[in-house]
Amino acid sequence: QVQLVESGGGLVQAGDSLRLSCTASVPTFSLYIMGWFRQAPGKEREFVAAISRSAGNTAYADSQKGRFTISRDNAKNTVYLQMNSLKPEDTAVYHCAADGPKVGAKTVTTTATEYDYWGQGTQVTVSA
C-alpha cells in the first residue's frame, strides 16, 4: 500500500511563495510518475503539474507555467512543488498523486483517473 503525505501548505499573501512536499512510503519510488492536483471549494479537481520517474520530463497546466516548478528527489522518496507569485485563485487543497509502479515509455500523466494513489492534501490559502 502506497501512502502519500503532503506538507508545506499555509496562509500567504498574493505574490508570496510556498514549497509543498509529498513523501511516499514505497521502496520503489523511482518507478512512480508523480503529480500534483488541486481542488478549490465548489470546483472539480484540476491538474497542476507532473514529473516523470527520472525527472527528465515535466508537464504543467497552462495557468501554472512559469510560476510553479515540480521536482523530485528519488533518494528521499519526495516530490516537491515550488509555487511562486501566488495568486488568490491558487487557493485550494493541493494533493499529490502517484501513478505506478511503471516500466516502459510512459513519461508523465496529466489525467487524474490514471493515478493510483492519492494523498490527503494540504491547504494553500492566498489572500489578496
Image (spheres, grey):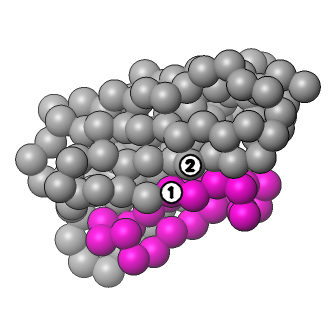
Quadrant position of residue 89 = top right
Residue 82: percent from left, percent from top: 56, 48
Compute the Cα span from label 1 to label 2: 6 Å
Residue ID at (83%, 22%): 127
Residue nearest the viewer, comparing 39 with 122: 122
Bounds of the magenta segment: 49-70
SS of the residue under disc 2: strand
Residue nearest the viewer, comparing 108 with 30: 30
Few, some or many C-alpha atoms within 10 Å of disc 1 (few <14, some 14-19, many ≥20)? many
- Residue identified by numbered label 1: 70
| Closer to the eye: label 1 or 2 | 2
Where is the N terminus found, in terms of image quarters? Answer: top left
Residue ID at (79%, 27%): 13
- Amino acid at dot 1: Ile
Residue 71 visible here: yes
**Side (left or right) of 88 relative to 23:** right
- Amino acid at dot 2: Gln
- Residue at the right extreme? 128
Residue 114 visible here: no
Marks 1,2: beta carbons within 8 A: yes
- Residue identified by numbered label 2: 82
Of pointers 1 and 2, the one earlier in the residue sequence = 1
Residue ID at (32%, 80%): 105
Q: Is residue 112 above or below residue 90?
A: below
